[in-house]
């Protein structure tokens, strides 16, 4: 139960059209970790393995359900639909997983009337699960309408294209996915904004991981001519145009870089400041290489971590202190900044920063040791 992508191997020959397909958004059966029973069956009850959804190659998000009884099928929808996989409300997962089959829109020879999704979360109105996906796809040019289902549904003609993108080793993308984003984004988006951008997380709500004392980093980057950019405060078109126009981008390892990889120029300098434990930086290296032809400079300078007291630690939500001096030296060596005159804070400064964080968020934080 794994998915692999060969970045050089086209997936278009594996597309199939299933007549009177049965789409099962929430099926009977056993969950396996985060993977729920859901998927697609042929009219004869054969499970369609290419419709299984994955976060990364080894992490499925759906598993084969039990086929629904005829009486359980809610309705039949007419027309030709493309199976879109799972619709996420999280920006990064929507970008990497909910778009991962849309390449077929440019490779299927017939008219597609709609894209059919299964919701990540069970909402009373399944269409509400499409808010984030619609926000992203609005920047892709003309596409069919998006729809989602909660109950087993018969689709007159369902186009199933293999998943061509995702996280971890799936970040290479299939050739069709890379061509799709190149046509729909890189070739279409007009560059705008400043030449040098620092993507900040300081404006995110408290559960989003970030750097402690990021205001110091922001001030130092501004002194180097960088504009501090808070993506969540701008529409997607602005984000895309700024990334397209930038000659240098410095950012933590976060979802903004997944979007930037679709439009940046191959001569754009990218500096990635790691903010959490683990090897997730490899995802960004892989995507930037295959989608943009860019080799980023990775700066691993975290020295201490904090997390909300009494809660199970989530690495993507930790607050990290980085070695400012090491970071500056690495950025200077990469030609991203000119002055490495950054100074590490004292123990007192760090303690005060934690006190301020706890006061601002009305939450107690404990240091964690990894």
Image: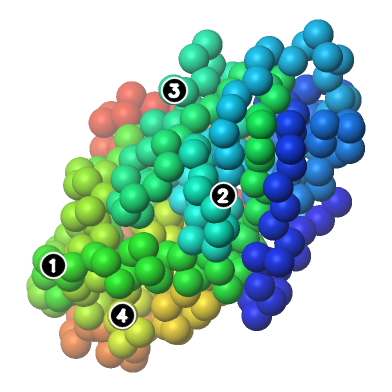
Q: Which residue is mark 4?
A: 265
Tag 4's secondary structure?
loop
N-terminal-most mark, 4 or 3: 3
- Mark 4 and mark 1: span between their CA atoms? 13 Å
Which quarter of the figure has residue 79? top right
Residue to which mark 1 is pinned: 192
* Front residue of 225 and 213: 225
Task: Label 3, secondary structure: give it.
Answer: helix
Report the residue at 82% width, 31% height from top. 43
On screen, residue 361 versus residue 197, left or right, reads right
| Residue furthest top in the image | 71
Dividing the picture into quadrants, the one containing residue 169 is bottom right
Few, some or many C-alpha atoms within 10 Å of disc 2 (few <14, some 14-19, many ≥20)? many
Residue closer to the observer: 334 or 56: 56
Q: Residue at x 83, y 14 (%)?
A: 70
Question: The C terminus appears in which quarter of the rendering?
Answer: bottom right
151 to 289, vertically: above or below = above
- What is the C-alpha distance between the residues marked 3 and 1? 32 Å
Q: Earlier in the sequence, mark 2 or mark 4?
A: 2
Question: Can you identify the residue that label 3 sits on?
Answer: 128
Q: Earlier in the sequence, mark 1 or mark 2?
A: 2
* x 58%, y 73%: residue: 175
Q: Which residue is mark 2?
A: 97
């Amino acid at each position: 139960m794994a998915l692999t992508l060969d970045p050089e191997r086209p997936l278009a020959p594996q597309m199939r059209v299933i007549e009177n397909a049965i789409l099962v958004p929430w099926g009977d059966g056993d969950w396996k970790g985060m993977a729920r029973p859901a998927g697609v069956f042929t009219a004869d009850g054969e499970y369609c393995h290419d419709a299984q959804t994955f976060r990364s190659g080894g992490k499925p998000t759906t598993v084969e359900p039990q086929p629904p009884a005829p009486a359980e099928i809610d309705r039949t929808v007419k027309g030709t639909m493309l199976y879109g996989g799972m619709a996420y409300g999280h920006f990064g997962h929507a970008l990497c997983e909910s778009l991962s089959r849309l390449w077929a829109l440019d490779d299927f020879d017939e008219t597609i009337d709609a894209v059919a999704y299964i919701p990540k979360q069970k909402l009373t109105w399944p269409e509400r699960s499409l808010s984030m996906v619609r926000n992203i796809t609005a920047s892709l040019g003309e596409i069919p309408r998006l729809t989602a289902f909660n109950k087993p549904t018969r689709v007159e003609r369902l186009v199933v294209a293999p998943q061509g993108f995702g996280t971890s080793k799936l970040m290479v993308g299939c050739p069709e996915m890379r061509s799709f984003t190149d046509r729909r984004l890189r070739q279409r988006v007009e560059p705008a904004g400043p030449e040098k951008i620092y993507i900040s997380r300081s404006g995110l709500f408290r559960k989003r991981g970030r750097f402690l004392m990021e205001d110091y980093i922001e001030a130092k980057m501004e002194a180097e001519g960088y504009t501090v950019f808070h993506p969540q405060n701008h529409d997607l078109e602005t984000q895309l145009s700024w990334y397209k126009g930038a000659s240098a981008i410095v950012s933590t390892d976060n979802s903004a870089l997944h979007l930037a990889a679709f439009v940046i120029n191959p001569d754009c300098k990218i500096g990635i400041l790691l903010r959490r434990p683990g090897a997730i930086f490899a995802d960004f290296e892989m995507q930037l290489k295959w989608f943009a032809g860019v080799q980023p400079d990775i700066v691993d300078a975290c020295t201490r971590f904090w997390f909300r007291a009494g809660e199970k630690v989530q690495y993507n939500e930790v607050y990290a202190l980085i070695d400012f001096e090491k970071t500056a030296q690495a950025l200077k060596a990469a030609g991203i900044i000119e002055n490495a005159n950054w100074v590490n804070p004292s123990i007192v400064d760090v303690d005060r920063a934690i006190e301020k964080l706890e006061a601002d968020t009305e939450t107690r934080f404990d240091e964690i040791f990894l």
